[in-house]
Image: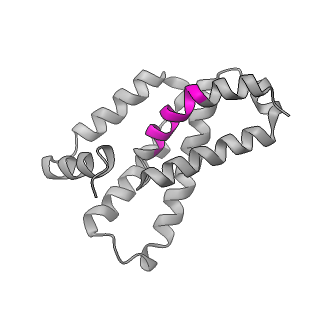
Amino acid sequence: MPNTNDYSKIYELYFPKLVRFSQTYVLSLQEAENIVQDIFLYLWEHPELIRSMKNRNAFLFTMVKNRCIDYLREQTLHKNQRHSLSELQEKELQLKLYALQQVDENKFSETEIEDIIQHAINSLPNKCREIFVLSWLEGLQ
């Protein structure tokens, strides 16, 4: 059983950041929250991981990154079953998967990761960026 106080502090500090990071890559806030909740549940069930974390930031972001990659791969594999994705959304999904696979959290601070994400968003074509910002960052769908 983890120390409840330590676990709560980690949860309060990292949950919003990890959800924001995850939401950049997955297609919904709900899925991003589910991914991060699953990670915290896993940490609760494996308290030795909390005690052994040397670089908490890198460890948690790596866990989220890996879960997002798994989620995006699953989405890509089942694309024939998805009828609601447009060609643009499908390409965006592929780009997100590729970008996420390239992130090495051990080389970057949290601020640097957020800067990389912002740069990636800014590099999108104008209309694509506008759609992305409205749908994923502002929650309009």
- Say if 30 sits above or below 118 in the image: below
For this rendering, which residue is in front, 19 or 49?
19
At x 26%, y 50%, the residue is 132
- Say if 5 sits above or below 139 in the image: above
* Image side of residue 100 versus residue 5, left or right: left
Image-quadrant location for residue 48: top right
Q: Main secondary structure of the magenta part?
A: helix
* Image side of residue 64 versus residue 94, left or right: right
Query: Where residue 85 appears, x then y in whole percent?
Result: 33, 70
Query: Where residue 89 appears, x then y in whole percent?
Result: 30, 62
Quadrant showing the C terminus: bottom left
Judge whether residue 68 is colored magenta.
no
Query: Where residue 124 appears, x then y in whole percent?
Result: 22, 45
Judge whether residue 15 is colored magenta.
yes
* Image side of residue 97 versus residue 133, left or right: right
Q: Which residues are magenta?
A: 12-22
At x 59%, y 37%, the residue is 62
At x 65%, y 23%, the residue is 9
At x 48%, y 53%, the residue is 30
- Say if 85 sits above or below 101 in the image: below
